[in-house]
Image: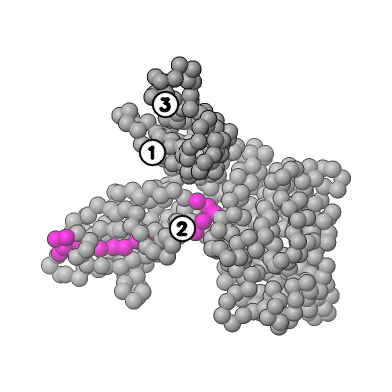
Amino acid sequence: IAQKEEWGGISDRDALSKPDPCVLIKMQSHGQWLEVDRTEVIRSSISPTFSKVFTLDFYFEEVQRLRYELYDISSSHNGIKEADFLGAMECTLGQIVSQRKLSRPLLKQGNTVGKSFIMVRPSVTLRSLFLILLSFPLYSKSDPFLEIFRINDDSSLQLVHRTETVMNNLNPVWKTFKTSLNSLCSGDHDRPLKVQWECINPKYKIKKKNYKNSGIVILNQCKVIHSLIVIKQVFDCHLFSQVAIDFTASNGDPHNSCSLHYIHPYQPNEYLKALVAVGEICQDYDSDKMFPAFGFGARIPPDFKVSHDFAVNFNEENPECAGIQGVVEAYQNCLPKLQLYGPTNIAPIIQKVARSASQEMHTKEAMQYFILLILTDGVITDMADTREAIVQASHLPMSIIIVGVGSADFSDMQMLDGDDGILRSPKGEPCLRDIVQFVPFRNFKHGSPAELAKTVLAEVPNQVVDYYNNKGIKPKVPSEFESSRTFAP
């Protein structure tokens, strides 16, 4: 993502001179703000437009936090270190890209809002992901690693990637890795790479008459995924996220601290952790920031009949909540009013969202796409109906993310995820495309919430592009992408 900045109405504190503004851009990493780059200095300006472009790799499935800091260096002789701090703005890269033009007020010391503002304009550049899997059999003991270099315009070599070292292994297989196409070859598909496929040791070649090589590099897999072209397509359509929460009795009494629905005064339960981790990322791209939230498997007031698709805010006419925080509040407010019951049926909620997606599919432009996040604690009891619902939904602009909460045996749930084969309906009809991603929360219980979000959302961009490719709808991409031969992964 390339970004340009404009600042408006910088406070002119010195009546005799105007500030000489400069902007630093920082990205948060492990809780620390690290400088990425900085703009040029514009002399004597209270409304500067900076020509410097910041280029950042953007990942849909991650929260990438940015901070823009504005300084006046007119009185500084040692650059930023002694410059006057004028204010800052924080946001996520996802917010910038999804809004296309982000304008925010400048916050001064103590987070007080000033009169100045910043405007950031993004543009998408080609940053496809290059996935590569290599194996490297050797014929002598070694601790091998592999380096891949790009060949620059001046014929110099630049290191692109160095694999991990595989200790004492004659047939090592390195982990799959990804790098941007820009880093790999500046977006040039015809630019050569230097990888020594047949490994020749010059000393051995001289000494040994029958010497052929010391090993062979084998490229097992290479995928070019147009992930940012996909993202561009996502932004040209409207993304709508919806949430469904399991309120069956197997979760345990919410008043009991052992319950998966227990509301602890100091730390969120697993449902809330999963909801916030995934929902915060979806929120940046959701068109209206309103999340319809549903529940299933509970007896609900006033007649306390079992429902498998009720509104968590109990407003069936308008189940939407304002942002993920609104979903959290609705969830906490509804718990005391419900009777957790059962069974664990998720087909009704999939069919409910599918009806909305089906209506969109029949519109002229069909530029709305739906993401359904299902949080459940156990193996579902309507597997046949669920398989049928998913197969039918695979024809619609829709993706389904299922997060398994708790310690139940989720082995049967893996069948719904098409990674190990094509899911079929009970009648044998196959899914048109893979739209389900299932992840047990316990795999991330002791890790970062960002890792959970990254895992469950990583497939969404390709699922979106698969849908539009199947419908014959081409993404609206900048002219520089017209030479791209295909948008399929």
Please check the rendered image and state whether residue 210 is part of the magenta-colored stretch, yes or no: no
Name the secondary structure under disc 3.
Answer: loop
Q: Does 323 sit left or right of 64 as displayed?
A: right
What is the CA distance from the residue labelled 3 to the residue labelled 1?
Answer: 21 Å
N-terminal of the pair, mark 2 or mark 3, is 2
Q: Main secondary structure of the magenta part?
A: loop
Number of the label disc, if any, that sits on residue 64: 2
Residue 288 visible in the snapshot = no
Which quadrant is home to the C terminus?
top right
Give the amino acid type for the residue marked by disc 1 in the picture.
Answer: Leu
The residue most toward the left is 16
Name the secondary structure under disc 2.
Answer: loop
Q: Residue at the spot x=43%, y=37% of the render? A: 147
Location of residue 297 with respect to 453 vertically, above or below = below
Question: Which-is-in-front pick, marks 3 and 1?
Answer: 3
Q: Residue at the spot x=56%, y=55% of the render? A: 454
Q: Which residues are magenta?
A: 59-78
Give the amino acid type for the residue marked by disc 2 in the picture.
Answer: Gln
Q: List the residue tagged with mark 1.
A: 159
Question: Which-is-in-front pick, marks 1 and 2?
Answer: 1
Location of residue 360 with respect to 195 vertically, above or below = below
The percent coordinates of residue 15 (x first, y second) are: 15, 70
Give the amino acid type for the residue marked by disc 3 in the picture.
Answer: Asn
